[in-house]
């Protein structure tokens, strides 16, 4: 399945808008020319700030050949009949429109370098990347399919945690995804997590930190409790570098910190170490949809 | 301020009046028995009014009631218990009590989130909020349980995992994620009892189980009502409203298939008849263990996986892999 | 094999000596009547100080029925032809005479409560409880026999570390014993370590801290580096409680701290939890020598 | 003061004189060639005298030579190396470098004790003394190696495990004991190279291996000579004497069966021809891996156990279990 229309629509929109030609870096204040920013993988050319990426832009940055999306038909319901300022269903609708995504994660198969992989990419732009049933179900399904096809799994996380509006059904996705990770792990296939800004709560305390190798994107905020919650608890300001990828590297929580332009090459090297050269997961035959292209 | 405690205070005045009346009537003979009956009726009616049907917010308060049985009350009623301390690396976390025990003769591994009964004890126990060391101790004991084929019984009672700086520095995320991973594969029966507050991932870390028992007025929630209100509306005082929306009661969760069994509480809550009630909960756990002990180990883990596999509410617009002919 | 003559000899000697009737507690200074001290398991009746125990006294405190010693025929050699103030062989000889032990550990089978166990007890009185080849070989052999007979293992440690006078052959016992512990563990049998004063160096960094359950005797000094070494490194005095059993409990390193009079009952309870009631290790038939008595 | 460095300084004077003489003779024609030859002969003789046969204490100094190749020199020569950091819990220990690498095309997991080349780097690397976090990182990577069937190559170079307060507080003992336990069962080839100092349990923690390679002038000892002298004679200055007694040289250890192979060093030590020498060591490692990669996994662990099972020197007065008829 090729890159969906949403993305093209979004891009067209952006390119039509005059104002969108220039973007201000929230870190250093520099005005950046959008095309240049995009060419630099969404990293500020002046200070190295990593802009958050749209899931499909991220996918484009990582993969070779095409992206075979799966799980797109898994869509949210409103099990708690939730409504606060607006009904949950309305929120979903406006997020869908704004993000051009059907939910907070996109899952599918792709080739990174020559390696066929099961790939999941979260998007903070949809409900703050929160994990509700759909994220849990898509992740679970992806790991199950990866296990069945003997493929490595790569998940790019970006999440504010469990999704309030689905209550305990959201929390239980931590258990569900964990069990799928476990089955994949016990079958002997590699799992690489890429933690991007921000990765917190129910996602960080489940599949994000269960990977064989954990890569964190430079400067990403990563932690269990959110910064605000901690500051309220201790009633003081936290140091700037607290919960950054670099801080976590020093504290021993993540294996590697990379700047985004190096991410793809890093993943290819890691896959090259971890994927058994003789295994069926090494050839594109594991994903006939890719091989056929 | 706990609204259940406040109600109990108002009832106490009435109780005192009934007591006084009883004493007076005993002195004067049976004449005021009609007043008496009226008062007693009023008392019973009030009790039913106050406690007969509890709203989610009332249950939140019940789950946090200062006299509600806490983990140590259950552990004290085991045949035997030997606490095992520490994560073997950094610290023994008093908020997570673990050890070897015996319930109705059956050897078990116990994991319990332990609140305190008074302020001093609560400070020592960090109000039941577990740090990474506590989860790492729990994980170690889960592995011990697996090694020696001992079933795991966990008592869940926490407002959430500890959200402090130090816990972040030692990777609370990894600690919880590892507990989940271990529980997802440990080949022994796991029974969890939500005895008070089941707060978020910090609760789930020891509650991923073959059989989840929830006390009627306990709560089990994706976030504390205060936290939810703060996050969604930047207004923690709207906790009552959040409690109503979050579907955190035992009935709700039984309906969702998240909880497998409810133990109903005496009118007014578990603490009204604590001793008997604790025994009933332990009996319920024991029954679940009896049932699970007959299941073959592989099947046990398989069923556990299948149980959690189903949980959620989603729709599918079309068949999965509609675009893939091969499947 | 009954309690060997050494022990009886030592006891007779002690009882003959007038001076030996009274012992001064090194912790509180109290003069203690020896018989009373012995009746209190070698714990000061005033301050609770735990006197170091002779291996056979320790065995007597722990076991029911008799003790079937094995490995006693494994005896030291002098592979490095070591000599400093005195030749190694002379040191061994005088330690043998002073301690009435053939080496720094006694190994064998016994029943603790109704549980047949493989039991090893170290003695600080022989070369400071250091682990040379003989300690390594006896421990390894004990674990192997425990595995073969499907028995739990209980090791009471007391050691200054690896034995200098056997050089690298001593260090390698860490690897050798570890592999025997591993085989026993993977066969599924329980191993309980009881750490007593002092347990350090090569013993603490191998089988002492590899047990399923680690019990520490109250106030025992336990650590990797010795107190003196650390003080020299940091050039300051360490706090009194540093490296004590109680300190380690707080730091999460040991499961249980017990006072010596409670040790036997604690071990029986632990064995009762960990030994499978249906396993062959549950009956004394596992040790015919015990069953026959 | 390093005695090898001192000798090198005295040789340098001679080298300088030869150099000067050479320059002068070039200017003046061939007349002083006899002086020249004499000097050169003297230089070669001195070199042989100084380095031809090294005493244990001289080897201790060679192992600690400031220009001796350290772990990073070997790692830099791999086809590829990606460092993986941290114990996932507390800290990334710079004294223990670990990661994924490729040696002659073969994928490996690397574990290395890393000293610094200068004071600043040495402080950052804690002079190669590993803390519990470093051993826990090592253990984690050993398990990764086991999971993905990658052989383990370790570079050993430490005066011993870190003996600080903080390391004690986080259980240095448990950290080392766990590494040993993991290496005793990991079902992949393990090759260890003692490249400098192999100090005590802190070295062994990553050196329990199927094949142990020792560089000719490296040392591997139950304790540092200084430590041994301090413990036995309360006099660290008798380190030279201790070094002689401890049997810490490669020849001694090959004889004891503790080391499986020696890589001989150029006259004057590995640093005299570092580049070529590092390549030779890597070649030796590669050959060992080639050999071990053909061994079935179970047999591999079985042989590893058998190898360590034999190490030691004891006597048996009678048959074991002489008193037991049943056996
Ligand atoms: Zn910028
Ligand atoms: Zn005393």
Image (cartoon, coloured by chain):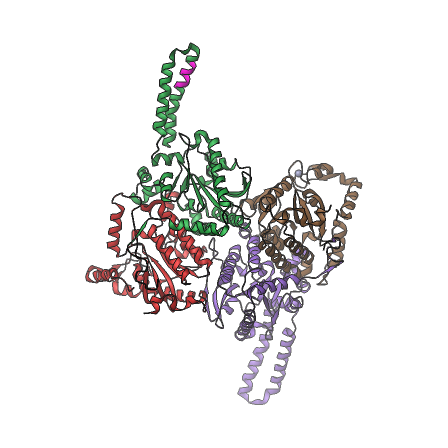
Chain colours: A red, B green, C brown, D purple
Above or below residue A71? Residue B229 is above
Verify whether residue C255 appears in magenta.
no
Span colored in magenta: B17-23
Q: Tell me the chief SS of the magenta region.
A: helix
Q: Nearer the viewer, residue B279 or B65?
A: B279
Where is residue C98? Give x, y as percent. Answer: 75, 50
Q: Nearer the viewer, residue A86 or C252?
A: A86
Would residue A120 be found to the left or right of residue B208 on screen? Answer: left
Above or below residue C42? Residue D170 is below
Would residue C107 be found to the left or right of residue B186 on screen? Answer: right
Where is residue C224? Give x, y as percent. Answer: 59, 53
Q: Quadrant of the C terminus of chain D?
A: bottom right
Would residue B41 be found to the left or right of residue D305 on screen? Answer: left
Q: How many marks?
A: 0
Q: Quadrant of ligand 1?
A: bottom left
Above or below residue C1? Residue D191 is below
Answer whether residue A130 is visible to the viewer in this image.
Answer: no
- Residue drawn 61% across and 71% down? D262
């Amino acid at each position: 399945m090729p890159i969906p229309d949403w993305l093209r629509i979004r891009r067209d929109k952006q390119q039509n808008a005059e104002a969108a030609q220039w973007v201000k870096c929230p870190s250093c204040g520099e005005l950046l020319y959008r095309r240049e920013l995009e060419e630099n993988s969404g990293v500020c050319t002046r200070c190295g700030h990593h802009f958050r990426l749209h899931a499909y832009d991220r996918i484009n940055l990582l993969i070779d050949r095409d992206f075979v999306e799966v799980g797109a038909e898994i869509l949210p319901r409103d099990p708690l009949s939730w409504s606060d300022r607006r009904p949950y269903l309305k929120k979903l609708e406006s997020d869908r429109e704004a993000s051009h995504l059907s939910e907070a994660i996109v899952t599918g198969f792709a080739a990174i370098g020559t390696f066929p992989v099961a790939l999941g990419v979260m998007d903070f732009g949809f409900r703050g990347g929160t994990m509700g049933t759909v994220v849990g179900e898509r992740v679970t399904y992806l790991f199950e399919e990866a296990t069945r096809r003997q493929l490595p799994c790569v998940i790019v996380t970006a999440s504010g945690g469990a999704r309030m509006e689905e209550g305990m059904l959201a929390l239980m996705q931590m258990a569900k995804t964990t069990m799928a990770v476990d089955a994949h792990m016990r079958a002997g296939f590699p799992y690489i997590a890429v933690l991007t800004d921000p990765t917190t709560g129910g996602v960080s305390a489940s599949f994000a930190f269960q990977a064989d190798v954990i890569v964190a994107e430079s400067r990403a905020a990563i932690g269990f409790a959110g910064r605000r919650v901690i500051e309220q608890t201790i009633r003081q300001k936290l140091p700037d570098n607290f919960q950054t990828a670099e801080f976590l590297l020093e504290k021993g929580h993540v294996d590697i910190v990379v700047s985004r332009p190096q991410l793809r090459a890093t993943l290819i090297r890691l896959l090259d170490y971890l994927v058994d050269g003789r295994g069926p997961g090494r050839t594109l035959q594991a994903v006939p949809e890719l091989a056929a292209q | 301020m706990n609204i259940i405690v406040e109600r109990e205070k108002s009832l106490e005045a009435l109780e005192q009046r009934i007591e006084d009346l009883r004493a007076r009537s005993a002195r004067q003979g049976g004449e005021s028995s009609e007043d008496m009956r009226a008062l007693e009726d009023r008392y019973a009616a009030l009790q039913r009014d106050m406690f007969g049907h509890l709203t989610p917010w009332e249950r939140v308060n019940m789950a946090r009631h200062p006299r509600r049985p806490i983990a140590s009350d259950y552990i004290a009623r085991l045949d035997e218990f030997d606490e095992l301390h520490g994560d073997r690396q950094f610290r023994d976390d008093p908020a997570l009590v673990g050890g070897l025990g015996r319930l109705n003769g059956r050897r078990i591994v116990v994991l319990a989130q332990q609140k305190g009964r008074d302020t001093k004890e609560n400070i020592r126990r960090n109000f039941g909020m577990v740090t990474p060391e506590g989860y790492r101790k729990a994980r170690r004991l889960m592995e011990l349980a697996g090694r020696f084929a001992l079933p795991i019984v966990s008592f869940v009672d926490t407002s959430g995992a500890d959200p402090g700086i130090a816990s972040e520095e030692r990777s609370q995320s990894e600690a919880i994620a590892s507990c989940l991973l271990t529980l997802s594969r440990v080949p022994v029966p796991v029974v969890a009892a939500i005895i008070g507050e089941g707060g978020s991932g910090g609760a789930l870390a020891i509650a991923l189980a073959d059989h989840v028992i929830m006390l009627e007025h306990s709560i089990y929630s994706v976030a504390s009502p205060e936290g939810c209100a703060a996050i969604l509306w930047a207004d923690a005082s709207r906790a009552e409203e959040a409690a109503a929306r979050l579907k955190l009661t035992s009935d709700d969760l039984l309906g969702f298939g998240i909880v497998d069994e409810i133990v109903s509480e005496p009118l007014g809550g578990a603490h009204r008849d604590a001793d008997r009630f604790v025994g009933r909960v332990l009996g319920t756990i024991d029954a679940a263990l009896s049932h699970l002990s007959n299941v073959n180990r592989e099947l046990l883990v398989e069923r556990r996986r299948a149980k959690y596999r189903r949980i959620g509410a989603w729709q599918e617009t079309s068949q999965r892999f509609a675009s893939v002919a091969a499947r």
